[in-house]
Amino acid sequence: MFDLTGFQRDLLYVVCGLDGPHGLAIKEEMEEYYEGEIHHGRLYPNLDTLVDKGLVEKAQKDRRTNIYSITRRGEREIAARNEWEQQYRAGEPSG
């Protein structure tokens, strides 16, 4: 996950937290968090990057709508990130 942008990490967490969201639902969640409009030109290329990296799967719901879901690899990456963050929140950095 170290090679993702902050925006891509946030997208990954949103996809993980929602049940098979479509792009508009993801967009709405991100806009609420970022307190501003997220343009399609920013959202969908970043979702495609997550798909290309094997962290998210994209499936077609109908001819106009895709749905997204986290992959096992994506879940492992989030778990590893949470573990890494926890060591610093707990005040026990290694090394």
Image (cartoon, rainbow, N blue to C red):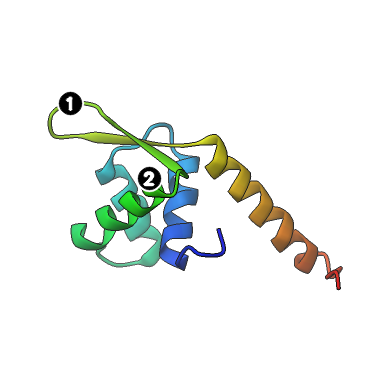
Viewport quadrant of the N terminus: bottom right
* Displayed quadrant of residue 83: bottom right
Q: Residues within 10 Å of mark 1 (few under 14, many from 20)?
A: few
Residue tagged 1: 62
* Displayed quadrant of residue 75: top right
Q: Depth check: 7 or 71 in front? A: 71
What amino acid is found at the position of numbered circle 1 in the picture?
Asp
Q: Residue 15, percent across and down?
A: 43, 43
Point out the residue furthest to the top here: 62
Point out the residue furthest to the left here: 63
Q: Residue 95, percent across and down?
A: 86, 73
Q: Residue at x 77, y 68 (%)?
A: 88
Point out the residue furthest to the bottom here: 95
Q: Total label count? A: 2
Q: Which mark is residue 75?
A: none
Say left or right for 95 vs 13.
right
Q: Depth check: 67 or 95 in front? A: 95
Mark 1 residue element: loop
- Mark 1 touching mark 2, by CB under 8 A? no
Q: Residues within 10 Å of mark 2 (few under 14, many from 20)?
A: some
Q: Residue at x 70, y 62 (%)?
A: 85
Q: Is 48 placed above or below 34 here?
A: above
Q: Residue at x 49, y 36 (%)?
A: 71
Q: Residue 14, percent across and down?
A: 44, 48
Residue tagged 2: 51
Say left or right for 16 vs 51.
right
Q: Is 48 placed above or below 8 here?
A: above
What amino acid is found at the position of numbered circle 2 in the picture?
Val
Mark 2 residue element: helix
Point out the frontmost of discs 1 and 2.
2
Disc nearer the start of the sequence (1/2): 2
Q: State the CA–CA distance, disc 1 to disc 2.
A: 18 Å
